[in-house]
Image (cartoon, rainbow, N blue to C red):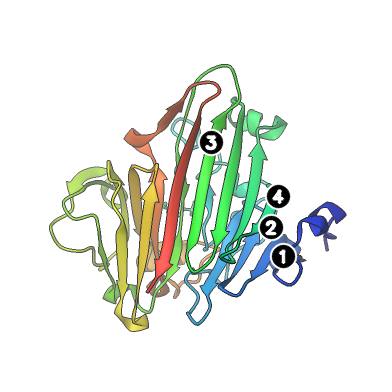
Amino acid sequence: MKPVSAALRRLEIPGVTVFENGSGDLLRLAIHSPLAEAHIYLHGAHVSHFQPRDAAPVLFMSRQSAFAPDKPIRGGVPVIFPWFGARAGHPESPAHGFARLSEWQVESLTIDGDEIVTAVFQLKSNTRTRELWPHDFTLRYRVAVGRTLRMTLEVENTGTEPFSFENALHTYFTVGDVRETATTGLEGAEYLDKTDGMQRKKQGPEPIRITSETDRVFEGTRKTCVLDDPKQKRRVTVEKSGSQTTVVWNPWVAKSAAMTDFGHDEWPGMLCIETANAGANAITLAPGKSHAMRTVISVG
Ligand code: BG6
């Protein structure tokens, strides 16, 4: 078991936040505020749990997730950087980049007058990240836990050359039955269909309903999405800024069976609506410049 350092203990807000050993003995921040509960692993700065008071949990977590320093966590909100999916021309590189596989530092932990708890995590380029991606950067990830979950990922170019990156807050939502859900906000938008050789298609005027494996990368959209979940009698709203891509993903039957860190029967209980900048929406940052992407999750 990894002991909690004195430096982390000093950041704790008594009665509200505590650092503890979570699954796989990985360190996590647990927040129990008057407004909500949340867990955030330092591994990947990964939000694995968010539950406003008097509401059901919002995020899906696979019961088969790995919790290990060299593996991503399956569920919650993986932080994706600096490439989305497989890295073009680099089959040896980890899928979805290295941010979700890295141990992040905790920069600060605060609670404001409205009882919103904000944790700020930081990841700086280092020898290991430079071996995978030869650029200097600082990532700052601000997670604000209140009645809503507000996550802001800031990328700063601390090097001397411009670089391009993709990113995503790969949010897994827990749903009553994905086949009964309807997602609005992407009507008429163009997408690349990853289940059909990356063909470019256009979403019709109707909400998205999940009737088979779905893996759609919507480019050029800044719109808010609303996930209607009649079985749980709730709507989840995903608002965003600094993001031009939205990805909608459900692995359905065959892909679920092929994933070792996902239960074969778990696909009906989840849907990913991901706030991203991917493909044609990749961001190029000049030295000294920063880019911020934000997503705000609310339930009602
Ligand atoms: C989605 C991708 O964002 O993430 C899918 O569009 C992918 O193609 C899914 O299968 C999960 O990726 P991973 O690397 O966590 O298994």
- Write down the quadrant of residue 15 in the picture: bottom right
- Which residue carries the number 2 mark? 68
User: In the rendered structure, which amino acid carries the disc numbered 1?
Assistant: Gly
Relative to 264, is 138 on the left or the right? right
Rounded to the nearest whole Å, what is the CA distance between mark 4 and mark 2? 19 Å
Q: Nearer the viewer, residue 286 or 119?
A: 119
Neighbourhood count class around disc 1 (C-alpha, 10 Å): few under 14, some 14–19, many 20 upward? few
When the figure is inspected, residue 193 is found, relative to residue 133, above or below; the finding is: below
User: Which callout, 3 or 1, points at the residue further toward the start of the chain?
Assistant: 1
14 versus 247 height, above or below: below
Residue at screen point 50% across, 20% down: 162
Residue picked out by circle 1: 24
Q: Is mark 4 within 8 Å of ligand 1?
A: no
- Under mark 2, the amino acid is Ala
- Asked whether mark 3 lies closer than 8 Å to ligand 1, one says no
The residues tagged by marks 3 and 2 sit, at their Cα atoms, a distance apart of 25 Å
Q: Position of residue 178 (x, y in %)?
A: 33, 73
Of callouts 2 and 1, the N-terminal one:
1
Q: Nearer the viewer, residue 9 or 139?
A: 9
Name the spot of residue 291 as percent of width and height, x first.
Answer: 47, 35
Compute the Cα span from label 4 to label 1.
20 Å
Badges 3 and 1: C-beta atoms under 8 Å apart?
no
Q: Is residue 163 above or below residue 277?
A: above
Query: In the rendered structure, are the residues bearing label 4 and label 3 in contact, judged by CB atoms less than 8 Å apart?
Result: no
In the picture provided, is 66 more to the left or to the right than 190?
right
Looking at the rendered structure, the secondary structure element under dot 4 is: strand
- Residue wearing tag 4: 106
* Labels 2 & 1 near each other (Cβ < 8 A): yes
Amino acid type at circle 4 is: Val
Q: Position of residue 90 (x, y in %)?
A: 50, 32
Q: Is the residue under label 2 in contact with that under label 4 (CB below 8 Å)?
A: no
Disc 3 marks which amino acid? Val
